[in-house]
Every structure is written in C-alpha cells, then in structure tokens.
Amino acid sequence: MTGGARETHIGHGANVDAPAKLHEMPEAGVDRRSRLPAWVVSWLQILPLTAILLVMFALPTTLFLAVSFFDYDRTGIYPAFMLDNYREIFTSSSTLRVYGSTLKFTLIVWVITLFLGFNIAHFLIFHVLNGKIRIVLFLLCAVPFFTSAIIRTIAWIPFLGRTGAFNQALMGLHITTRPLDFLLFSDFSVVVAYVHLYTPLMIGPIANSLSKIDRSLIEAARDAGASRWQTMTNVVVPLSKTGIALGSILVMTQVMGDFFVVRQMSGGQSASIVSALSTEIQAMQHPPAAANAMILVVIVAIMVSCLMRVVDIRKELVK
C-alpha cells in the first residue's frame, strides 16, 4: 500500500509539472527563433520610408541635377557637363526678377499668415473655453480644404473685379466713385489669394503647440507682475515656436512651389519660379528647367534649415 501510494504520488506530481514545462518550452523555442537583432529591426522599420524617399525624391533630384548640366537645342538634349545653364540664370536680369518676385511673395504671405494664424489659434485655444464650440470652429477652419484650391482661387476674380461685389459695395457706400483697379490682376490680388489659401496651414501647427502650454505658467507670469504683452512675448511665443516653425515651413514651401495663383491672380503681370519652369518645359528647354529646379530646391532647403536652427522640431515633437 505504501509503495503503491508513493508511486501514485510520484505519477500525480509528474502529471502536474509536465504541462507547465511543455507550455514553457515551446514559448522559449519560439522566442529564440523569432527574435531578431536590434539593428535588423531598426532597418526593417525605416526601410519603407527610405524606399519611398529614394524613389520619390532622391532619384528624381539626382536626375534633375544631371540634366541641368546637359546641352540642348530645338531637337533634343545631349549629355555633357557644362555650366551654361546656371550661368544664364545668374546673369539674366529677367530670371533674377522672377526669383525676387517669388521671394517677395513668400515673405509677405509668411508675415501675414503668421500674424493671422497665431492670433486665430490663440483665440481658439485660450479664449474659447467650450470644447464643443472650439471643435466646431476648428472644423470651420478646415472647411476650405474640402474645396479645390483652384476653385477657391478663381472665386476671387468675380469678387475683386471692376464689376465685382467688393467694388460695388465700396461705390454703394460712397467710399469711392470709381472701381479700384488694383484689387484684381495685381500683386495685391496674388497676396490675398495666397493668404486665403494658406492661413489654415499656419493655424493648425500653432494651435497644437499652444494647446500643450501649461496654464499655470501663464498664471505664474501674471502673478509675478508681467503684463499681457510680456506674458505673450516671454512665455507664450517661446513655447509655441515649434508650431510657428512648422506652419512657416508649410506656408513657405507652398508659395515657393506655386504657379497657378500667380498666373491667374496677376493676369500674367507677375511670374514665379515654377511658372518659369513650366514655360521652359513647354518650350522643350529641359536643361535650363532642371537648373532652375535645382536652385529652387536649394533655396527651399536653406529656408527650412534656417527654421530648423531656430527650433529643433524633431526634439520638440516627441515631447
């Protein structure tokens, strides 16, 4: 009886421990087989984005760079290494005026959109206390994106024209006795269209940065005797610099890369770098167009680098 009980006890213990061991062994085996080195996992994570950047950006940019040194005539382009395309750009007064016009529009639109975007975002974050109303107002800011930018641009033409609603309202109120010609097909109309199109791009990033500001910091500044202007310049603006930088990058790159707004709203009186590129491509002048494209990429890269020096966007975004 004693021996049988001992054998029964041993058999029972073996049956209890065996499932646990069998359960642990496959898991350990699976972990050993499926675990990859850390550097392999890192490369697998960045591989899709790297492939996209190589195919969609690096390869075309390299192609443009190579073609920018080629020779050309009316019948085609010929592989060569010559600097004539770049020399013509920097020695042509008309081309330099186009670059100056594009940079002028970029600077003016950036200043106006920054002023409007910051104030609108500040109002939505700090003055609209009801969360539902704030969401509705943010959605209203995003409504223009539901319509094509081309339609939104063309809509300004009948509004600002000589017989448009704005001129008619001014004459109806006896503010002016004749239509204002500068409202349409001028630099003014170009800036108005740009501001209308790209102010929402400035509102979003700035509002996101403002929403992360701890309200106790603002209250502490006020308790210390700081005025509203001092609180704004010493607390709010420095803490929202990430949103300002992101919004600035979005607006500047959009203006630098646009040609439709300038062509339509200026009536052909103003030009942009991209419109010059379009004209050269239509004339089968691909090497000069490639050279202009490379200079445009360099200018935009310099702008973005300057903004990145003001704020480390990558570091701020992970907070």
Image (tube, helix red, strand yellow):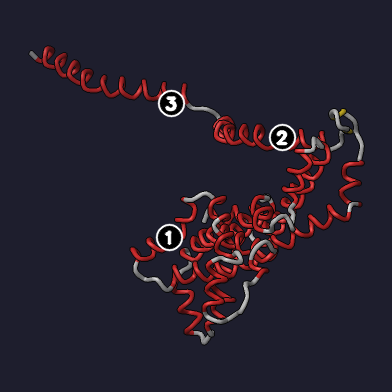
Q: In this view, does 99 lie above or below 224?
A: above
Q: In which quarter of the image is residue 18?
A: top left
The answer to whether any part of residue 90 appears in the image is yes
Q: Nearer the viewer, residue 258 or 261?
A: 261
Q: Nearer the viewer, residue 82 or 209?
A: 82
In the displayed structure image, the side of residue 275 where residue 173 appears, left or right: left
Q: What residue type is labelled 3?
A: Asp
Q: In this view, does 300 lie above or below 25?
A: below
Describe the element under mark 3 as helix, strand or loop.
Answer: helix
Of the residues under marks 2 and 1, which one precedes in the sequence? 2
**Label 2 vs label 3, nearer the camera:** 2
Q: Which mark is residue 59?
A: none
Q: Where is residue 102 in the image (x, y as percent from the top left)?
A: 74, 57
Where is mark 1, residue-wise? 140
The answer to whether any part of residue 202 appears in the image is no
Where is mark 3, residue-wise? 31
In the displayed structure image, the side of residue 15 where residue 146 appears, left or right: right
Q: Which amino acid does label 2 sit on?
A: Pro
**Label 2 vs label 1, nearer the camera:** 1
Q: Position of residue 262 (x, y in %)?
A: 68, 55
Where is mark 2, residue-wise? 60
Q: Position of residue 318 (x, y in %)?
A: 53, 53
Q: Which amino acid does label 1 sit on?
A: Leu
In the displayed structure image, the side of residue 177 where residue 20 appears, left or right: left
Describe the element under mark 1 as helix, strand or loop.
Answer: helix
